[in-house]
Amino acid sequence: MSTNDMRTPKAKISYLGSARSGTSDHALQRMTALAIAPLAIFFIVSVVALAGAEYETARAYLANPLVSILFIALIGTGVIHMRIGVKIVIEDYVHGETLKHFTLIANSFFSYAIGLACIYAVLKIGFSS
């Protein structure tokens, strides 16, 4: 750093790194990662167990409230984890402020739209007769 820098110490660090929301994003992403680990194992075991099964068998399995809740929990934590990860990439690599704000909004809408579609699919299959 130049010795001729006339900015105050606060001005030198303003809006850099985790001075805004990086710490809370980091903590939330780690919590969702911890939640995803056992839920992903449950998902993989479920898919392997249902491999080759007929639709009615899979539907009956997904109609179990515990199974549906665990699948919805996996979807929710996965969507939050994905949204935060993409948000970090956007904040680091998109430099225009207008474009950055637009892509952050689009990221949130896309993430939640995917999550809602997945939850709808789980509920539709689980509740269908």
Image (tube, rainbow, N blue to C red):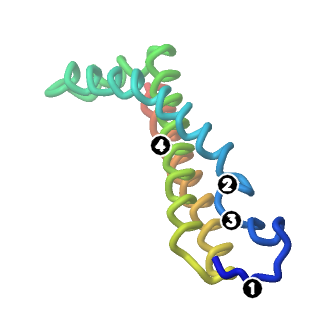
Residues at marks 4 and 2, CA–CA distance in whole angstroms: 32 Å
- The quarter of the image holding the C terminus is top left
Residues at marks 3 and 4, CA–CA distance in whole angstroms: 36 Å
Q: Relative to residue 8, is residue 125 drawn left or right?
A: left
**Is 23 located above or below residue 37 in the figure?**
below
Residue at image point 47% right, 34% down:
33
Q: Earlier in the sequence, mark 4 or mark 2?
A: 2
Residue at image point 44% right, 18% down:
67
Tell me where residue 90 appears, x and y as whole percent.
54, 67
**Residue named by callout 4:** 118
Q: How crowded is mark 1: few (under 14 residues within 10 Å), some or many (20 or more)?
A: few
Tell me where residue 113 appears, x and y as whole percent.
56, 54
Q: What element carries label 2?
A: helix
Residue type, mark 4 in image: Cys
**Residue named by callout 1:** 4
Q: Relative to residue 123, is residue 13 drawn left or right?
A: right
Q: Earlier in the sequence, mark 3 or mark 1?
A: 1
**Residue named by callout 2:** 18
In front of the other: 38 or 13: 13
